[in-house]
Image: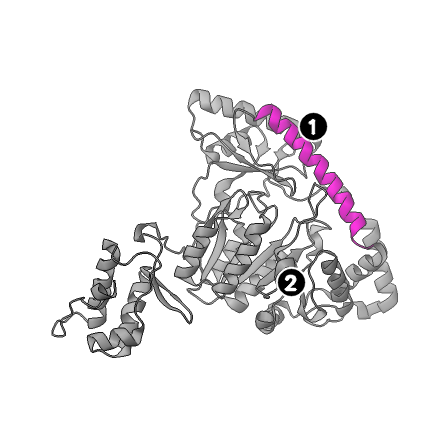
């Protein structure tokens, strides 16, 4: 193989630059199969000596091939042939067609399966009212002073204990309080993403996060999902090619698929992040909503190399209007993220932070979380019972055993967009899968969120879905 590399013909009299001639010669060898996938190209100095050129010429040739995704470089190891055929390599998406579904559509009698919020009757209003009163009585006007930009220290201490109970060992200095998970993603993007950087996301993915990355000029690469997480062979191939700034993912009850990662894939993901020197953003919105006996093991709990930026929102499990969450930050990104948070809003509401600390101190966490899990589990089983009754034989659906939604695959002959339009006519609101595709393409899926819908309406809605599938299939209304 090296013999063929060293026999590429170059003509120093040509107007075509030498680096380009070398790149074209190497391209031909790759296309012919003389340079197999993952084979290593000769060191820069060796190539320069063989062709009687300077090192810069070889660097330029290798960089030219890398820009075409024909090769990839590995820090400290050299340059290697791409494992993918050129036609299989996706172009990064510079600007997506992310269309936000009109979840705010409101019909008085509509069955709203697009709403992921839980009923407000479940919110611990009385306990928080008491916490608010106690903070005001204790601190008077001082309750509204700015706190440390990282967050109210007693609250961060409480949250460290909570995290440790969930297997995540950290320190107060690594915990950053944020105004919800979306702000966390925004702040990380602001701190870490530069125009043109590549970010990996799951496919399909949460459009709020994708939108934040795109707004900073990131190029998104989608990693396909399998039943137990991202497809690891594709992930590694793309890591070799693109050197992403970070990988964005949800380890449990992923939005929108409901997929949870296997332990094997979580460990593999951490191994790959370390090997290819990148970070992982792990978003935890729904981990508290697990409906079996075993609590989820966050990816961050396995993160011995400090590669995971963990973001947790309290909006789903407590109250959406609190706009409160946390990040656990690796040391290397800590300062940059902290500065980005400060320039965003100086600090998250000190009064809300103090009230939350008071609430946790008096009520703990687990009692309310158990009540929410009990409610969510009942809704989940109820939704499944009627999915089985009205969708089996018509559509397929996920069995996430957690979260607040079902991911439903329609028959191939039926467009999800058309189906959602037909369901709107029947006063049933669903989220089409296209809202979770960066390209905006029709994925053939719909998301059905069950936790905010009354039991009798869940049955009515699923029955109408089954009838509409039959009607569209019979009349070939695609």
CA distance for labels 2 and 1: 39 Å
Q: Is residue 297 left or right of residue 350?
A: left
Answer whether residue 351 is visible to the viewer in this image. Answer: no
Q: Which mark is residue 456?
A: 1
- Identify the residue at horizontal 51%, vertical 29% (top origin): 422
The extreme left residue here reads 13
Q: Is residue 151 left or right of residue 421?
A: right
Q: Which mark is residue 249?
A: none
Vertical placement of residue 350 versus 445, above or below? below
Q: Toward the viewer: 201 or 472?
A: 201
Splitting the image into 4 quarters, where does residue 454 fall?
top right
Instruction: Locate residue 443, reporting x and y percent.
Output: 46, 39
- Identify the residue at horizontal 61%, vertical 48% (top origin): 252
Q: Magenta part of the protein: which range?
A: 364-391
Vertical placement of residue 462 versus 57, above or below? above
The extreme top residue here reads 474
Vertical placement of residue 286 versus 4, above or below? above
Q: Secondary structure at mark 2?
A: strand
Splitting the image into 4 quarters, where does residue 135 fall?
bottom right
- Identify the residue at horizontal 46%, vertical 32% (top origin): 418
Chosen colour scheme: one colour
Q: Toward the viewer: 60 or 185?
A: 60
Q: Which mark is residue 327?
A: 2
Kindly check if marks 2 and 1 are in contact, taking CB atoms under 8 A apart as contact.
no
Instruction: Locate residue 346, reporting x and y percent.
Output: 65, 70
């Amino acid at each position: 193989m090296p013999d063929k590399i060293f026999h590429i013909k170059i003509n120093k009299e040509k107007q075509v630059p030498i680096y380009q001639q070398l790149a074209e010669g190497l391209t031909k060898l790759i296309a012919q199969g003389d340079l197999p996938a993952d084979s290593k190209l000769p060191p820069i100095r060796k190539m320069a000596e063989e062709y009687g050129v300077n090192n810069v010429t070889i660097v330029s040739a290798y960089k030219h091939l890398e820009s075409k995704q024909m090769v990839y470089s590995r820090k400290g190891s050299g340059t290697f042939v791409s494992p993918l055929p050129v036609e299989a390599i996706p172009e990064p998406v510079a600007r997506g067609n992310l269309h936000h579904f009109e979840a705010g559509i409101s019909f008085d009698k509509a069955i709203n399966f697009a709403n992921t919020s839980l009923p407000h009757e479940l919110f611990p209003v009385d306990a928080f009212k008491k916490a608010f009163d106690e903070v005001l009585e204790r601190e008077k006007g001082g309750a509204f002073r700015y706190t440390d930009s990282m967050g109210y220290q007693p609250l961060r201490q409480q949250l460290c204990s909570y995290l440790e109970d969930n297997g995540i060992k950290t320190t107060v200095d690594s915990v950053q309080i944020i105004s919800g998970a979306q702000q966390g993603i925004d702040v990380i993007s602001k701190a870490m993403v530069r125009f043109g950087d590549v970010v990996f996301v799951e496919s399909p993915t949460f459009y709020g996060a994708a939108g934040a990355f795109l707004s900073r000029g990131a190029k998104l690469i989608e990693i396909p999902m399998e039943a137990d997480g991202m497809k690891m062979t594709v992930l590694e191939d793309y890591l070799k090619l693109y050197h992403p700034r970070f990988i964005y993912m949800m380890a449990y009850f992923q939005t929108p698929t409901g997929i949870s990662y296997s332990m094997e894939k979580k460990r593999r993901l951490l191994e790959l992040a370390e090997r290819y020197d990148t970070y992982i953003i792990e978003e935890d919105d729904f981990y508290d909503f697990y409906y079996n006996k075993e609590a989820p093991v966050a990816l961050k709990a396995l993160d011995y190399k400090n590669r995971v930026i963990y973001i947790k929102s309290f909006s789903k499990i407590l109250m959406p209007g609190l706009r409160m969450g946390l990040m656990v930050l690796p040391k290397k990104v800590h300062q940059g993220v902290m500065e980005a948070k400060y320039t965003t809003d100086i600090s998250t509401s000190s009064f809300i932070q103090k009230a939350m600390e008071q609430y946790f101190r008096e009520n703990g966490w687990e009692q309310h979380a158990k009540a929410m899990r009990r409610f969510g589990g009942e809704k989940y089983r109820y939704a499944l019972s009627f999915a089985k009754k009205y969708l089996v034989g018509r559509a397929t659906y996920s069995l996430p055993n957690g979260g607040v939604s079902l991911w439903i695959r329609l028959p191939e002959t039926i467009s999800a967009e058309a189906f959602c339009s037909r369901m709107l006519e029947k006063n049933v609101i669903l989220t089409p899968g296209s809202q979770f595709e960066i390209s905006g393409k029709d994925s053939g899926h719909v998301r059905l969120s069950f936790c905010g819908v009354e039991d009798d309406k869940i049955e009515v809605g699923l029955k109408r879905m089954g009838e509409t599938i039959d009607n569209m299939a019979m009349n070939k209304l695609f």
